[in-house]
Amino acid sequence: MEEYKLFIDGKWVNSSSNETFLSLDPSNKKPIGKFQKGNEKDVEKAVQAAERSLEEWKNTPAPKRGEILLEASYLLKKNKQRLAELVTQEMGKVIKEAKGDVQEAIDTFEYFSGEGRRLFGRTTPSELRNKFCMTTRIPIGIVGLITPWNFPTAIPAWKLAPSLICGNTVVFKPASDTPLCAIEVIKILEEAGIPNGVVNLITGPADKVGTTIIKHKKIRAISFTGSRATGEFVLKNAGIKKVGLELGGKNAIIIMDDADLNLALEGVIWGGFGTTGQRCTAASRVIIHEKVKKQFEKMFVEKTKKLKLGNGLDSKTDVGPLINENALKKVHSYTEIGKKEKAKLLIGGNLGNSKGYFYQPTIFTDVKPNMRIAQEEIFGPTICLISVKNLNEAIKVCNSVSYGLSSSIYTNNISNAFNAIKDIESGITYINSSTIGAEVHLPFGGVKETGSFREAGWSGIEEFSEEKTIYVDYSGKLQKAQIDSVESKKK
């Protein structure tokens, strides 16, 4: 079995712990490799390397930094099939989705390479004569990136690409369920020509690696995607630094009585069971008008019965495994909770085959908005159907959860659509489409307890840089902004 290493200061090295851990294929529970169990000493070495390389990297012209990102995009494209198969093997998602995961990384590096010729500031008039005002973008410094397992190639790209184009250096901890996907991304950057020390990768446990990154005083920003509980820990322990959090969702698809039900059904299947429900944007709630509830239920169950569970490398597979045993236990526990809450189980609710971490696509109906299965993030292939009488009630139910990431409405009424856009509390709203499918040149993120920042698009630049305000006074005398303007008015 191959043993993989840490990447510090441009070299692949063993951890000072002399310990390793395994990453398993969730479809068959077989190990795919040994990985370094990093610790505090390894993080310190990575920070020192990032600090040494910072001055040179931030002074490298941004278009030149962009050339490296563009080359990384080309290399990802060249290796797309191989990397997609690795995503399926290590994370479990079906191969067509795994290709999408890699494609998102390709698109992200390509997009942010172009930002190297933008990094726009602003100019604005001064209130005084012979004075010029503008802003510019400057690097934050060393940034700590902590990524989840559900998009093991795409989300590292979301964080790495804007960090690097803005001139920051990086200490990166990937999820321990998918370390090999992260290692392959770093190998791509290495081949693309990233200078030594600019990107450093530490695999290992959260308490040794993640906590050290979060608390380290020389790391000036943290970008974290993961659970709400861990997000709270980050906020409490990061100190005074820039913190970006994306913490999940309890997303809803609203289906109105005038909706195209066949189109809505496609969106619900894709949103709820795509990636086995293991997306922060997964559609775990379907808020449906009472007039079409029974008709849609029948269509939904019939379609779900035809879904095939299995290894994602099989092109006939529709739903892959959950990521690990803990996820399997959690999802099943919510099935039991739903039953105790007197929701009606229409289909599923059982484990799949014992070879891997499989769970049957599960549908509950007659769900009340305040039930736990309608309020808490399950992160599995479980969908709750909630009946409503009108749009106002639908939006109220949609907003009744603590999260606010993604949302969707199926309707052929433009008034319904624009009222949903206006009143739904979420960072993303889709009209006549599912809750998943973000594009890399647009901001991604949510409101309420989903988190505190936006990734991707122009927001990625804003999150991974600082805005510096500059005043140039060429009047030849000392001008005092508000004081001088007040004195001028008195005269």
Image (tube, grey):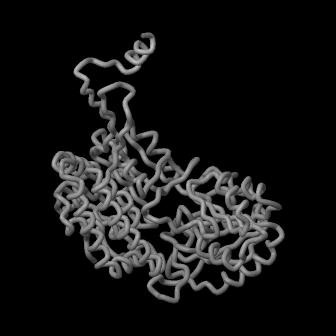
The residue shown at (46%, 45%) is 233
Q: In the figure, residue 359 lies in which quadrant? A: bottom right
The residue shown at (31%, 61%) is 114
Residue 96 against residue 40 in the figure, above or below: below
Q: Position of residue 20 (x, y in %)?
A: 29, 64
Please indicate, yes or no, whether residue 171 appears anywhere in the rendered image.
Answer: no
Q: In the figure, residue 259 lies in which quadrant? A: bottom right
Q: Where is residue 21 in the image (x, y as percent from the top left)?
A: 33, 65
Tally the marks. Answer: 0
State the quadrant of the N terminus. bottom left
Residue 467 against residue 411 in the figure, above or below: above
The residue shown at (37%, 64%) is 108
The answer to whether residue 270 is left or right of residue 367 is left
Q: Position of residue 77 (x, y in %)?
A: 32, 76
Q: In the figure, residue 198 lies in which quadrant? A: bottom left
Residue 318 against residue 276 in the figure, above or below: below
Q: Position of residue 353 (x, y in %)?
A: 56, 82
Please indicate, yes or no, whether residue 1 appears anywhere in the rendered image.
Answer: yes
The residue shown at (48%, 83%) is 311
The answer to whether residue 243 is left or right of residue 342 is left
Q: Which residue lies furthest to the front in this view?
A: 491
State the quadrant of the C terminus. top left
Depth check: give the residue in front, 468 or 175: 468
